[in-house]
Image (cartoon, helix red, strand yellow):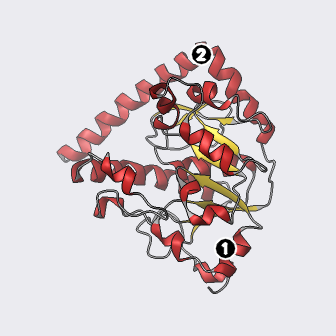
Amino acid sequence: MSKFDSKDKLDALIYKTYNVLSDIIFGFNFQSKSLVRRNAAYKDIHSGQRCFILGTGPSLACLGEDQIERLSTEIVFGVNSLYKSTLANKITPKYYTLIDNLYWEDARLYSTSLSPTFGEIANKYLHNPPVFITDPRAKYVVEDIASENNPIYIYSKKYPTEEMSADITGNVYAAMNCVTYSVLAAIFMGFKEVYILGCDYNAFCNFGSGHCYDDKDELKNNKYNLGFYLKFYAITTEFHYLTAKLAKNAGIKVINLTPGSLLDAYPRESLEGVLGQC
């Protein structure tokens, strides 16, 4: 057995022990338990349907008008800063995933209960607000602006070593990536076909630059180096593999439609084959 294999086995043992402790802590976290149990209302709510998860990769900017028009009639998940793109003026997400802690912690910087990001998204889709998919710690941020739709809170404090879980009414395994969280939510909701777009998965090649919107302001505060990106992508990719395994075992198609995507966890199909030619 190589040293790398030995390290992996030791890490797995540590994480499994950690996961047991995490479930025990969750058992006493009555507020979070109460919040995630409400997710049961979304169980199989879209049974047999299909959805599209839109990342924020630059490939989204290449969609043709006919493709955008077709997407506007589909059930769409938005993530992160998708609302900043021109695409957001033509497509209204039914669900919007904001898992990263920066999206609710930025409210504290402004000494307000309203996160600039959550608030901007709510204002963007004022007449048809999306259902937010977020962390229970964001409750104080979304409770005022999500009055029309019950948010989906995901409590994910376990580290995946051999499997992922889509039962978001409990303590699930962390996914790290908003697209992965969206896939898990989609599986829980009963979708049978999940298509991923705008997941170029190549930020480690260009130090985070390149989105379907103007990201100059974001990059000014980017202090990550190549080591961080490679480590982050390695871990996140393993989680995608486990998610793909979960979907396959459940008989759910998760298809990557992103042209030139480096993510190989899911089967690929041509964008034109699903949405038609540009």
**Viewer-proximal residue, 63 or 259?**
63
State the residue at coordinates (51%, 44%). 163
Q: Is residue 129 above or below residue 200?
A: above
State the residue at coordinates (32%, 45%). 221
State the residue at coordinates (46%, 49%). 239
Label annotation for residue 68 = 1
Residue 185 showing in the rendered view: no
Which image quadrant is residue 209 in?
bottom left
Residue 98 is situated, as x and y percent measured from the top left of the image, at 56, 43
Q: Is residue 37 above or below residue 245?
A: above
Q: CA distance from mark 1 to mark 2?
A: 43 Å
Task: Name the N-terminal-most of marks 1 and 2.
Answer: 2
Q: Are marks 1 and 2 in contact (CB under 8 Å)?
A: no
**Viewer-proximal residue, 116 or 44?**
116
**Viewer-proximal residue, 242 or 129?**
129
Residue 27 is situated, as x and y percent measured from the top left of the image, at 60, 16
* Residue behind mark 2: 29
Q: Is residue 114 above or below residue 94?
A: above
Residue sitting at the far bottom? 277
Residue sitting at the far top? 28
Q: Is residue 252 left or right of residue 26?
A: right
Label annotation for residue 158 = none
Which image quadrant is residue 262 in?
bottom left
